Image: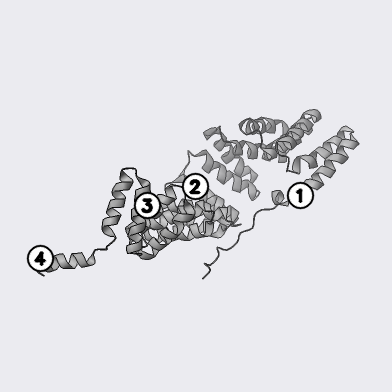
Amino acid sequence: MTPLAALLALAFLQSPADPLSEQAIAAAQSGDLASAARLWSEAIAKDPKHFPSLFNLGLMLHRQKRQAEAAPLLERAAAVQPTFQVHLIRGQNFQQLDRREDAIRAWRAALALQPKNVKLMQVLSVEYTKGRYFHEAAAVARQAIATAPDDANLYFLAIKAFQDAGDQNSAATLAAQASARFPQSGRAQFEHGYYLQKKGDTAAALPFLKRAMELDPGYEEPFFFYGDLLVKQGKFDEALGPLRKALTLRPDYSPARVALARALSRVDKLPDAIAELEQAALLDPRNAQPWVLLAQLYFKQGNEEKARHARETSLRLRRENPEVLEAAQARPFPAKQQ
């Protein structure tokens, strides 16, 4: 091809929108966003499939929190050039428009282009969970572990996802793996201990919960579960310390306060037990559990009127807040409507 022919071919391939797009970029870089928007709009009018103009104008509107205006431009850009970046921004845009399923679809398209992008896998797992698509959340969390097996947080993400999905065996297996792989992680030791006690192996669970308390004294969960297991074993005096520690770390932790009340009531500290439950009811007013035990302890104290009120309150709260007692059910991710 001669030099003249090459120039003619290049001119033929260029879009009439290119000069306007270049001017728009310069305007945006100088801070004149109004002119940039006008120039990109003119460019799109000349060439409706001009990717740089569609994407840049959509991105600018998205960053200006004008998500509804940005969405169709980003969709058109993705139809022209389905790049990782455009799918990523589409997902963010849909998320801010509260269109979770569309955001997930956009991010799945981005992940298909960068299948080892662990950060995006984490985002997807969280968004799946928010939508109660628990099985999908678990699958992508496991994919993240396979990609970055030395990241402890990915194990915790996957354990929670499998737990939500109702697959306790997979969650327990991952917890055991995390405990062995990250021996200095208090969270990893706790997760293993939690699943051991969940299947009834208390003797095996206690050392892991104790180790978790030693490794991470600012983490309330091991203190609660350790203390709660001691209560169930009838070791009420021993349970008081870890349960109080859990509540020092998290005062609104209702299960810990209820467990502490059970222990106190069994060591002849009935007024203290009632005070703990009354505080739990105040801090967590939708939870029926403190009122159930309060009804029993008020009756034991000889206050039948208070016992009757507590029992009625517990029944009312169970009726009004059934979701507090029931686990959220998984649902399948919906197919896109044509």
Q: Are marks 4 and 1 in contact (CB under 8 Å)?
A: no
Q: Are marks 3 and 2 in contact (CB under 8 Å)?
A: no
Mark 2 surroundings: few (<14), some (14-19) or many (≥20) residues within 10 A: many
Q: Are marks 3 and 1 in contact (CB under 8 Å)?
A: no
* Front one among 47 and 267: 47
Taking 78 as reference, is 236 above or below it? above
Residue 275 x, y percent position in the rendering: 77, 30
Mark 3–mark 2 distance (CA, rounded to whole Å): 51 Å
- The residue under label 2 is 178
Residue 268 can be seen in this image = no
Taking 140 as reference, is 215 above or below it? above
- The residue under label 1 is 320
Mark 2–mark 4 distance (CA, rounded to whole Å): 64 Å
Residue 57 occupies which quadrant of the picture? bottom left
- The residue under label 4 is 3
The amino acid type found where label 4 is placed reads: Pro
* Front one among 81 and 298: 81
Sequence-wise first label, 3 or 4: 4
Label 2 SS: helix
The amino acid type found where label 3 is placed reads: Ala
Sequence-wise first label, 4 or 1: 4
Q: Name the residue rendered at 74%, 37% in the picture.
A: 281
Mark 3–mark 1 distance (CA, rounded to whole Å): 51 Å
Residue 223 x, y percent position in the rendering: 62, 36
Q: Name the residue rendered at 29%, 60% in the picture.
A: 17
Q: Name the residue rendered at 76%, 31% in the picture.
A: 264
Q: Name the residue rendered at 32%, 63% in the picture.
A: 46
Sequence-wise first label, 3 or 1: 3
Q: Nearer the viewer, mark 3 or mark 2?
A: 3
Mark 4–mark 1 distance (CA, rounded to whole Å): 80 Å
Sequence-wise first label, 1 or 2: 2
